[in-house]
Amino acid sequence: MTLDVFVVGGGPSGATAAWDLARAGHKVALLDRAGRIKPCGGAIPPRAILDFDIPDHLLVAKVETARMISPTGRSVDIHIENGFVGMVDREDFDEFLRVRAITAGADRLTGTYLRIERDAAGNHVVWRDKATGQEQRTRTRLVIGADGARSVVARDHVPGGDKIPYVIAYHEIVRAPTTVANYDPKRCDVVYDGRISPDFYGWVFPHGDTASIGMGSGVDSVDLKQATADLRASSGLTGCETIRKEGAPIPLHPLDKWDNGRDVVLAGDAAGVVAPSSGEGIYYAMMGGRVAATAAQRFLASGKVRDLAVARKLFMKDHKTVFKVLRSMQDAYYRSDERRERFVSLCHDQDVQKLTFEAYMNKKLVAARPLAHLKIGIKNVAHLLRLVSPNWT
């Protein structure tokens, strides 16, 4: 039997692609290594819950406030109006997505991707079965590479796939405190402090009975575990029981090309689709899986390899502008603690808060308030040119 699509990687991106394709009646296999949990704050906005039918029981917490903390310890609380941000534990969330794809008709395979072999009989994915340790060969018309920021599929088959820039994210899942004054089970803390991360940020995110405490950095000299220990200490969480520790790369830029013009298309982290500045990845990974599935269906129907490029085109049509804005913000404000201090100061502005969270919750820029955009632009320039004090609001 020849599969229509072989999906490599069972995270949110690969599982979503397999789910969409199976529901459309295609013969699909989903290969996952199993036994691995990605370090992740676990935030999913209402748009993700709506677009991908995320059931309420997977939400281990519902966040109502985001606290931005500056290098000098100043903080700004941004309250989420008319809604919440859902928090998930990736161990349960990812498994739910995989099971949903299997229930829809995808075949579940557990093992490690090795390579693609091509011959007169077609394309064959070679993978190692986890249970037996033996190599297996599965024939397929198309491969979706959703195997993460260090994607082997991307490295071997897509131009630029071996050069994806990334930061390393590390977090520790701890038992949620009950008596720590600075901890709020309905608030996400985002720490902009060069002592924690010189080029990204640290976080304390509630997960119901547990909490995620972590940070990210692309600077080789940073001791991720020590930085996280320092963050736990400054947050009063040193004494909390540690349940598990995890680390993994987070890509920084979408690839210029997501397919090989033949039989491979990328999705999620493998394509580099993590939001700059925020590092948000779950929604964009799932959307990457969805557009990859759309491209796959067009390719399978037409047989035209140019249809594989549809995945990147559809994604960028909706999200390119947001990514550009977030990238410019990261480049401008994550360069030094003096800039980070100004960034948190800027977040005092009510227009900044409303426009930022409207964009985050709905995944599109809000264009209906031109005067607010103008006001923010002026304040932004004033801070970057040091025309005002970081204490100015």
Image: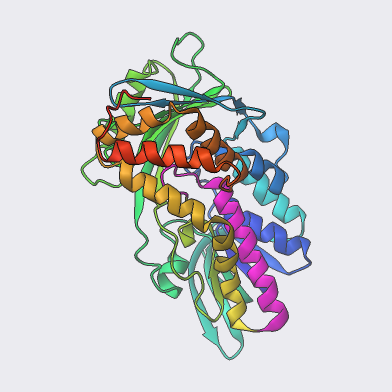
Position of residue 145 measured from the top left corner of the image (x, y, whole percent): 53, 65
Question: Can you say whether 231 is above or below 89 in the image?
Answer: above
In the image, residue 65 lies in the stretch drawn in magenta: no
Position of residue 163 measured from the top left corner of the image (x, y, whole percent): 34, 65
Question: Can you say whether 314 is above or below 201 in the image?
Answer: below
Residue at 63 percent across and 84 percent down: it is 304
Q: Nearer the viewer, residue 235 or 172?
A: 235
Residue at 73 percent across and 45 percent down: it is 53
Would you say the magenta stretch is mainly helix, strand or loop?
helix
* Residue 29 occupies quadrant: bottom right
Please give left or right for residue 346 compared with residue 90 in the image. left
Position of residue 157 measured from the top left corner of the image (x, y, whole percent): 45, 74
Q: Nearer the viewer, residue 365 or 218?
A: 365
* Residue 272 occupies quadrant: bottom left
Question: Can you say whether 314 is above or below 375 in the image?
Answer: below
What segment is highlighted magenta in the picture?
Answer: 275-303
Please give left or right for residue 13 compared with residue 379 in the image. right
- For the N terminus, give its image quadrant: bottom right
Q: Nearer the viewer, residue 138 or 18?
A: 18
* Count of numbered labels shown in the rendering: 0
Residue at 66 percent across and 77 percent down: it is 299
- For the C terminus, give its image quadrant: top left
Q: Is residue 219 visible?
A: yes
Q: Nearer the viewer, residue 209 or 205?
A: 205
